[in-house]
Amino acid sequence: MSNSPSENLIAPCGMNCGICIGYLRDKKPCSGCRSDSEFKPKHCVKCSIVNCEHLENGTSGFCYDCSIFPCARLKRLDKRYREKYHMSMIENLKVIKEKGINTFLAAENSRWLCKNCGAVLSVHRNACLQCYHPYKT
């Protein structure tokens, strides 16, 4: 991954796939929720949010366009990520909607770079995958 996340790596739920351990792994990396990669984990392929029938009705490709935003599915996912990884998909979506995707991507680029070596950090780990420097999100 380059040091700059791109719009196609931001999932409909607000997850930055560029900081997912599946995307960052060396062997058979996933190419993100919006891709059709053969290496995408089965739970991602079957994701009820990515496959949500309401997503087709919006124009942005993000859950914030939905009339039931945030739905129960997204709230459960958001709660799990807030508690385990200190990141909120709902907050991500609000920033994208209110400030635009470019502002969100710039903030993500700053937030998820290792202060020690400059590598992209994973939301699913608490140490840099390159230099093993610990960090808190």
Image: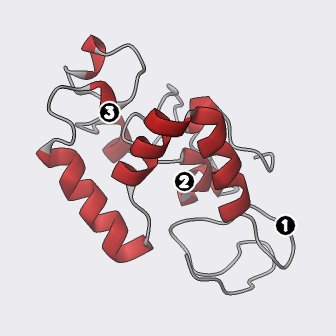
Q: Which mark is residue 64?
A: 3
Q: Which residue is the site of mark 2?
A: 22
User: Which badge, 3 or 1, comes first in the chain's sequence?
Assistant: 3
Residue 109: % across, % down? 71, 53
Q: Residues within 10 Å of mark 2 (few under 14, many from 20)?
A: many
Q: CA distance from mark 1 to mark 2?
A: 19 Å
Residue 80: % across, % down? 28, 66
The structure residue drawn at horizontal position 67% and vertical position 87%, both measured from the top left corner, is 134
User: Which of the image's four quarters has the C terminus?
Assistant: bottom right
Q: CA distance from mark 3 to mark 2?
A: 25 Å
Q: Residues within 10 Å of mark 1 (few under 14, many from 20)?
A: some
Residue 61: % across, % down? 41, 22
- Front-lying residue, 129 or 69: 69
Q: Which mark is residue 118?
A: 1
Q: Foreground mark, 1 or 2?
A: 1
Q: Is residue 14 visible?
A: no
Q: CA distance from mark 3 to mark 1?
A: 31 Å
User: Which badge, 1 or 2, comes first in the chain's sequence?
Assistant: 2
Side of 16 where 108 appears, left or right: right
Label 2 secondary element? helix
Name the image quarter holding residue 53.
top left
Q: Is residue 91 visible?
A: yes
Q: Foreground mark, 3 or 2?
A: 3
Name the amino acid type tagged 1. Answer: Gly
Name the amino acid type tagged 3. Answer: Tyr
What colouring style does the render use? secondary structure
Q: Eyeballing the image, is 14 above or below 38?
A: below
Residue 19: % across, % down? 60, 56
